Amino acid sequence: MRNLAASPSKTLRAIAFEQPYHSPMDIYLDQITSLHMTRTVLRDPCLGLATTEKNAPTALDTQRVNLSRLDMGGLLAYLQVPESRKLGIVVPHASDRIRTAGTRCSVDSSTKRKNAYLQLASVDDEHPSALVPPSTCVFVQSPPKIVLSMAKTIARHVHAQELSREVGVLRLVKLCLELCGTYAHDPFDPLCGDVTYKTSPLTNIQQIRDFLEPHGREHGLRMAREAANLAYDLSGSPQESFLGPALFYPSRYGGLTLCDYKANEELQLTKAEKALINWRTITPDFQLVGYQAAVEYLGHVHVEGDNPRIDHKRRLDYQTLGKRVFEFWYDDVKTISALNQSALRLVAAIEQSDGPGARKRF
């Protein structure tokens, strides 16, 4: 990834700019480019996001910007500007729109909130990343701000009847689960590209909810709050982010509404219980509230190395604690039909142990 950004794209020199701009300036990235860079930071150990007091874009003293003079060559080359992408820039007012090739300019005049932006930075100042401009400050929207900005875009599609509201909310939930989870999609191909696992979360659901709490009239704010109230922390993979909503969300969102649940919360064990098991802490992917049962999603890594032995010990621990564990593999969730069959097996197993009334309670 660092090699990709080592030198500016040749086509950058071919862009027609109206007027050169020599002075350092602040660039505020829009939600699409911010999400792209956030995913990049999670995958690149040389990049980081530093806190800043900036909470809103500032107006430039010129509207004609020469990007090639901003010392952003590495970043622009990495983002493939202008070959196949645009640099998304946010400005405070419509009159401040930047006029130059290779940019997508949007206006942000919403309620000013704290922690709205983070500054793109190098982890090691002695060996700076080529993606961090030496004299231009690049501000990335914080994860909560990305959620709100994306909600505005999705709300416009819902208003134009291009999406249903429920689909729009689920897309925001998926975004929240990734931003608050421990994985990151490929920045350039989030749908089919490789996923990076075991990343450190940049935010959590409570921080997103707190960010969305101030009253405002922003388009999409209600939808963003609805998604944040549905989402949960520490999802470990895209498949896990699908499994939870599919099993437990209300039917209006396409979920099976099996029962109340807790996601990625540690089991509360007594000292005596901890003394009986292999692991001192157990954190199921999902706990079925009201039942002595848990759901675990097992990705392909669970067949590698020592993981099968570790999974076996975890099963024994659940058995020792008197809890049923239902394990879902990729084949159990790869199609809607497969998921439905797996969910029926889950309900049947609980019905067998808890009696015929179990099905009515689901």
Image (tube, grey):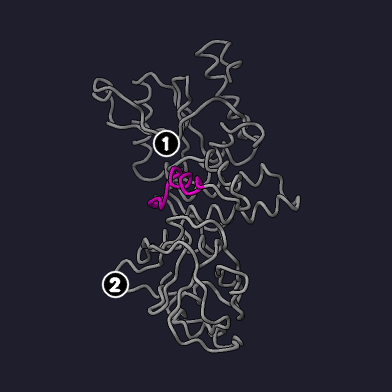
Name the residue at 41% across, 72% down.
Answer: 2
Classify 41 as above or below 246: below
Residue 275 placement: quadrant? top left
Image spot of residue 102 (x, y percent): 60, 77
Question: Does the magenta portion include 5?
Answer: no
Residue 115 placement: quadrant? bottom left
Name the quadrant of the N terminus. bottom left
Classify 318 as above or below 17: above
Name the residue at 45% across, 63% down.
Answer: 40
Say which element carries label 1. loop
The residue type indicated by label 1 comes to Asn
- On screen, residue 165 versus residue 122, left or right, reads right
Say which element carries label 2. loop
Image spot of residue 155 (x, y percent): 66, 51
- Residue at the right extreme of this rendering: 161
Name the residue at 53% across, 19% down.
Answer: 349
Q: Earlier in the sequence, mark 2 or mark 1?
A: 2
Nearer-the-camera pick, 155 or 287? 155
Gap between marks 2 and 1 measured at Cα:
36 Å
Question: Does the magenta portion include 200?
Answer: yes
The part of the chain drawn in magenta is: 199-214
Classify 92 as above or below 18: above
- On screen, residue 353 versus residue 255, left or right, reads left
The residue type indicated by label 2 comes to Asp
- Eye-nearest disc, 2 or 1: 2
Image spot of residue 279 (x, y percent): 29, 31
**How many badges with numbers are in the image?**
2
Per the rendering, the mark at residue 125 is 2
Name the quadrant of the C terminus. top right
Per the rendering, the mark at residue 264 is 1
Nearer-the-camera pick, 156 or 126? 156
Query: Could you classify mark 2 by the number of other residues whose Cα lies within 10 Å: few (under 14), some (14-19), or many (20 or more)?
Result: few
